Image (tube, rainbow, N blue to C red):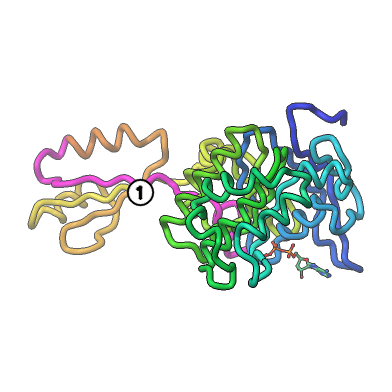
Amino acid sequence: MMDNPTHALIVENLGKRYGKMEVLKGIGITVAPGERVALLGHNGAGKSTLIKLILGLTHPSSGRISVAGHAPGSTAARTATAYLPEQVAFHKSLTGREQLTLFARLAGEHPKTVMPLLDRVGLGPAAQQRIGTWSKGMRQRLGLAQALLGHRHVALLDEPTSGLDPMSRHDLYAIIDEMAANGTAVLIASHALTELEARTDRIAIMRRGELVADDTLARLSARAALPTRIRLTAREGAADHVQAQLGGTRVNGCSVDLQCTTDQKMAQLSRISGLGEVVRDVEMAPPSLEDLYRHYCGEGM
Ligand SMILES: Nc1ncnc2c1ncn2[C@@H]1O[C@H](COP(=O)(O)OP(=O)(O)OP(=O)(O)O)[C@@H](O)[C@H]1O
């Protein structure tokens, strides 16, 4: 395949063996500039191995990778890639500003970019403190600041929000969105399904070294045809009547759970409203990313 300039990252028919063990089998995935792709999979599915191969830290047994048109590990590919590992390690005795200045020099960036970048990730006030005194969230932000140095075509983020509180997670995703809006292709390996659901454009799921899904949430959802759950709250004493009319399962004194496919949803809602005032409330839960993840990972298989 010719390199498509619309793809910042191309992974083609990638295989990796460790001795007899086949860790990656024919992986093909592309990420376009500005796209945010979630990379999901159980422990040991091969996500870290894929990231290591894209970084050029280990070599594929077969297949090909192109990072902004360059071979993984080459100087051009390294310059084009931002990488945030799960455990970010820094010199504890340096201040945030000193550490980032060091990274800026290594990346060929002018030290004057450092303070604005620290401000951008919310570390401006802590810039003169030693990293050894910082919280995990602050170190994670510094990792992100490092990843934001220069203009990167591809960002590889490994569990970027692990161990962060909800506010820090929110801020971190805002920065990731900004990176994508500036044209960086972002690949986020994570287990944090709920937050990824709203913050990524595409979902890629790996299972035992194979890519078993790679599409938008809406299309994965349509293909899986998982049911929408509907919980009805009946007026006091009316739950039996509601269940007799609509079927479903009683979950407690006054609630009834129903399930329906997407194309049955409107018909089901009109049957519910036909029951009139005996139904006090309706809650609908479409399939979540967690449901889809279970489906595509073939849980229980
Ligand atoms: N250097 C290595 N030598 C031998 N086997 C390895 C090596 N690195 C990884 N593996 C194996 O490859 C498989 C995939 O591991 P990998 O770390 O890529 O999974 P992962 O999806 O990143 O898991 P996690 O979510 O736990 O980080 C595992 O079975 C692992 O034991």
Q: Quadrant of residue 200?
A: top right
Which residue is the site of mark 1? Answer: 229
Seen in the image, is 292 located left or right of residue 232?
right
Q: Is residue 262 visible?
A: yes
In the image, what residue occupies the spot 44% across and 47% down?
A: 287
Span of residues in magenta? 274-301
Q: Quadrant of residue 127?
A: bottom right
In the image, what residue occupies the spot 81% across and 47% down?
A: 78
Front position in the image: 221 or 239: 221
Note whether ligand 1 is within 8 Å of mark 1. no
The N terminus lies in which quarter of the figure? top right
Seen in the image, is 196 located left or right of residue 110?
left
Front position in the image: 236 or 130: 130
- Give above or below for 29 relative to 289: above
In magenta segment, residue 86: no
Image x and y of residue 214, in percent: 65, 42
- Give above or below for 3 relative to 109: above
Q: Quadrant of residue 113?
A: top right
Image x and y of residue 107, in percent: 77, 48
Q: Dot 1 surroundings within 10 Å: few (below 14), some, or many (20 or more)?
A: some
Q: Amino acid at mark 1?
A: Arg
- Give above or below for 176 relative to 251: above
| Ligand 1 image-quadrant field | bottom right
In the image, what residue occupies the spot 51% across and 68% down?
A: 135
Q: Is residue 213 visible?
A: no
Q: How many marks?
A: 1
Image x and y of residue 191, in percent: 56, 59
Front position in the image: 13 or 115: 115
The secondary element bearing badge 1 is classed as: strand
In the image, what residue occupies the spot 67% across and 49% down?
A: 147
In magenta segment, residue 286: yes
The C terminus lies in which quarter of the figure? bottom right
